[in-house]
Amino acid sequence: MRNRLVALLFALLLAAPVAAQQVISETGIGYVAFEGNEQTVGSKVDDPAKVRVTVSITEHGGGGGVISFNASRIWGAVQFGGNQTEMAMLRVEQAEDVRGQVGNPKAEFNFLCNVGGTDDAAMRKCLSFTYDGITAISPGIANSIRGIAGGMVGGTGTSRMASPHNGYWLQLQDDGNYVIYDVSNPEQPRPVFDLWWLMFTLQQMGHPYPYAH
C-alpha cells in the first residue's frame, strides 16, 4: 500500500504543470519572454542580446539611463510605483567634466545605495567612475580599500597590508623580508610565514627560488 502511495505521488508530481515560457515579443533573431517571475531577453544568433536604456543629451546633460533596485513598502506584498522604496541604483549618464556638451557621449557610472530611509535623501553615492578614473567614492569604501591595499603603516621602516577582517598582516620589513603575521591577538602578532626562511629552505634543498620543477 505504501509503495502504491509513493508511486501515485510521484506520478502527480510529474503531471503537475510547469511554468511555461510566455513569449511577449519575437523576431527572427531575438525574443523577450517571461517564465514564472523571470524575464529573458534572448538572441537567436551568434550575437549577444542587448537591452537599450536611453535619453537625449541636452545643455543640462543627460544620456544613458537608470536601473533601480526596489523594495515594496508594504511588508510581504508586491507594490508598484509610489509604493516602492529604492534600495540601490546604477545610473549611467554624461560625465560631469563634459556635462552639457551636446554631442559628447563620454560616460560616467554612478552607484547609489540607500543608507536606511524611505525618501530620496537616503540615497547616497557610493562610487562613480569614468574610463580614466574614479570621480567619487564614499569615505567608508575608501578606508576599506586603503586597508586592503596596504595603506596602513606599521612601525619604523615597515609597511603593512591587512586582510579584510584584519586577522592577518603581510609586512614588508626594512631589511626587505616579507612576513605574514597572525594577529588574532593584536597585542602578540605571531609570524606564520617568512619569505627569507622559504628562500633559504629551498636553497638547502637544492632548488632555486621560486621553486621550479
Image (spheres, rainbow, N blue to C red):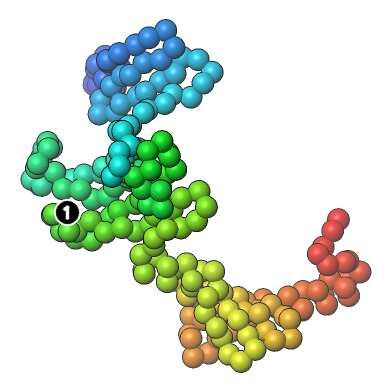
Q: On the image, which quarter does residue 142 sit in?
A: bottom left
> Which is more toward the observer, 109 or 213?
109
> Which is more toward the observer, 76 or 30?
30
Looking at the rendered structure, the kind of residue marked 1 is Asp
Residue 22: horizontal and vertical position, in percent? 27, 15
> Where is 103 relative to 51, above or below?
below
Can residue 11 be seen here? The reply is: no
Residue at 41%, 53% in the rendered image: 97
Residue 106: horizontal and vertical position, in percent? 44, 43
Residue at 46%, 58% in the rendered image: 134
> Where is 12 relative to 142, above or below?
above
Neighbour class for label 1 at 10 Å: few (<14), some, many (≥20)?
A: few
Residue 147: horizontal and vertical position, in percent? 48, 73
Q: Is residue 19 left or right of residue 159?
A: left
Q: Which quadrant is home to the C terminus?
A: bottom right
- Tag 1 secondary structure: helix
Q: On the image, which quarter does residue 126 sit in?
A: bottom left
* Residue picked out by circle 1: 120
Residue at 40%, 48% in the rendered image: 98
> Where is 184 relative to 142, above or below?
below
